Image (cartoon, grey):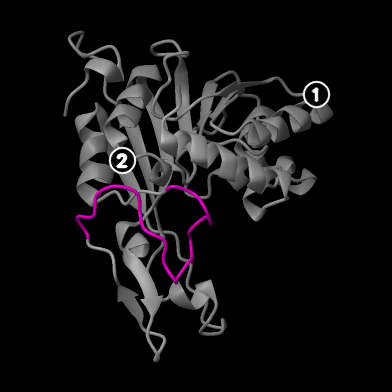
């Protein structure tokens, strides 16, 4: 039986996909002409992914999966939303690609074998689960030794913003040590309406990743500042608060005495 956050976020993302959300756009023909450059502007991926096993985690929607498949990877997509996965399936059929889709939550990958993937690629999605430890443990389990984990997450400070004052200054109205689902806020920038979201501190995002058996190799903060944007636009907000953090991590070689699944893993 699905937890409440899974059931609610499945409903929200089904609706977003069904209604043509900006976050549910498949890869274009132009993007597919040079898929690795589109996927990887930082040089984090190998020069070729042909023949590699890639897990697109919480990544339904027909974008990452299609680009990796066009580049020659063997792709599996796990997502909680069947409507998002349908976009992957339809686009794979249209382009003659072989993409496997699995409906499931990012923090429970029991359907996937140990050490099955060379790359795990996860777009912004960790905010939709309450605890990162099971997710990181599962990623470490399904990655092969020296496998790459590429991810993007919402910065905690961005999720602490509640509103703007009369001078368009951003007010931190959520405590840094807030627990449980985030409350609704006036400022909905970088929030998905109706979704159940959680604030994860840097201790969780970075420390939790390292404690799971992964080593951080690079970290970036994507620039979302727009100096031409009106003060009411999210691009103006990006001048003051970085919304995202991108991480490249690598699976440490196994020592042989590590836990086998998230169900027995403790930090």
Query: Who is closer to the viewer here, 153 or 28?
Result: 153
82 versus 261 height, above or below: below
Mark positioned earlier in the residue sequence (1 or 2)? 1
What percent of the width, then of the height, locates residue 153?
40, 49
- The magenta region covers 176-196
SS label for mark 2: strand
Q: Residue at x 57, y 45 (%)?
A: 12
The answer to whether 143 appears left or right of 267 in the picture is right
174 versus 5 height, above or below: below
Q: Residue at x 68, y 44 (%)?
A: 17
Q: Residue at x 53, y 44 (%)?
A: 40
The answer to whether 254 appears left or right of 190 in the picture is left
What percent of the width, then of the height, locates residue 217?
31, 40
The quadrant holding residue 11 is: top right
Q: Is residue 83 magenta?
A: no
69 versus 179 height, above or below: above
The C terminus lies in which quarter of the figure? top left
The quadrant holding residue 60 is: top right
| Residue linked to disc 1 | 96
| Residue linked to disc 2 | 217
What percent of the width, then of the height, locates residue 71?
65, 31
């Amino acid at each position: 039986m699905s937890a409440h956050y899974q059931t609610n976020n499945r409903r929200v993302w089904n609706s977003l996909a069904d209604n043509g959300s900006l976050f549910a756009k498949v890869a274009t023909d132009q993007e597919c002409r040079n898929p690795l450059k589109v996927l990887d502007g930082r040089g984090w991926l190998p020069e070729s992914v042909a023949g590699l096993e890639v897990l697109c985690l919480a990544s339904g929607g027909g974008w990452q999966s299609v680009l990796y498949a066009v580049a020659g990877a063997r792709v599996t997509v796990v997502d909680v939303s069947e409507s998002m996965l349908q976009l992957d399936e339809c686009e794979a059929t249209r382009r003659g690609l072989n993409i496997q889709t699995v409906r499931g939550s990012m923090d429970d990958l029991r359907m996937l074998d140990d050490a099955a993937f060379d790359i795990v690629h996860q777009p912004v999605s960790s905010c939709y689960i309450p605890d990162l430890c099971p997710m990181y443990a599962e990623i470490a389990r399904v990655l092969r030794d020296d496998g790459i984990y590429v991810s993007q997450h919402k910065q905690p400070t961005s999720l602490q913003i509640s509103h703007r004052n009369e001078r368009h200054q951003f007010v931190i109205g959520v405590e840094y040590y807030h627990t449980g689902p985030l409350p609704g806020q006036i400022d909905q920038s970088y929030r998905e309406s109706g979704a159940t979201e959680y604030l994860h501190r840097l201790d969780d995002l970075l420390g939790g990743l390292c404690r799971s058996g992964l080593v951080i190799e690079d970290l970036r903060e994507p620039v979302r500042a727009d100096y031409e944007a009106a003060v009411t636009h999210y691009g103006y907000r990006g001048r003051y608060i970085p919304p995202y953090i991108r991480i490249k991590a690598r699976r440490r070689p196994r020592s042989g005495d590590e836990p086998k699944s998230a169900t027995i893993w403790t930090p």
